[in-house]
Image: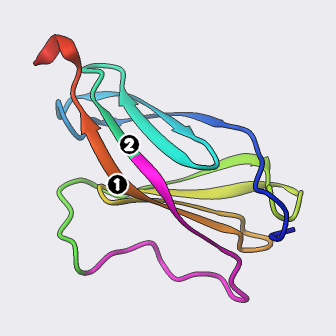
Amino acid sequence: MMDQPMTGGRWDIEKDTVCFNCHKGAVQLIEITPVETMITCTNCMAERHYTLHKIEVPDTPPGAFEDEPFRLHHDIWNFRYTDKCINCGNCVDNEVNVDEHRVRTLCPECYFTRLYEFNMFSESRSRR
């Protein structure tokens, strides 16, 4: 299926965790589309934007979502989101990993992987 244009719906995910900006516990709204990911804090309304960097379908499962060269200031968010894989078409618990620099989605059945890289930060207008 990788030779066809990438389609697929938007994933809207809510994760209750400490905000990367205001450092308070709040629901983080995570919007994942085929070309970008945006994370918005419901407390301070700060946003992190990630753009699609790479799509791959490896023969074996990719390694752990860790990045040795970067020293992270925040925890890595690891969770699952149930939806239809846009590559194999199966409804699966897709693995989602988020850190300060990247977002990765992974289908556990066909290993279809999307990697998004950090692009932009915008703080709420009311907090400027």
The kind of secondary structure element at disc 2 is strand
The residue indicated by pointer 2 is: 49
Relative image position of residue 97 (x, y in whole percent): 48, 58
Q: Main secondary structure of the magenta part?
A: loop
Q: Is residue 118 magenta?
A: no
The kind of residue on which mark 1 rests is: Phe
Name the mark on residue 72. none
The residue indicated by pointer 1 is: 118
* Residue under the image location 36 percent in, 58 percent down: 76
Relative image position of residue 65 (x, y in whole percent): 45, 72
Please identify the quadrant where the C terminus is shown.
top left
Relative image position of residue 57 (x, y in whole percent): 71, 77
* Residue under the image location 38 percent in, 42 percent down: 49
Tell me how many marks there are.
Answer: 2
The vertical placement of 32 against 102, above or below, is above
The kind of secondary structure element at disc 1 is strand
* Residue under the image location 52 percent in, 46 percent down: 36
The magenta segment is 50-68
* Residue under the image location 41 percent in, 37 percent down: 39
How many other residues sit within 10 Å of disc 2, few (<14), some (14-19) or many (≥20)?
Answer: some
The kind of residue on which mark 2 rests is: His
Q: Is residue 64 magenta?
A: yes
What's the CA distance linking mark 1 and mark 2?
A: 6 Å
Foreground residue among 55 and 42: 55
Label pair 1/2, CB-CB below 8 angstroms: yes
User: Going by the image, does 9 lie left or right of 20?
Assistant: right
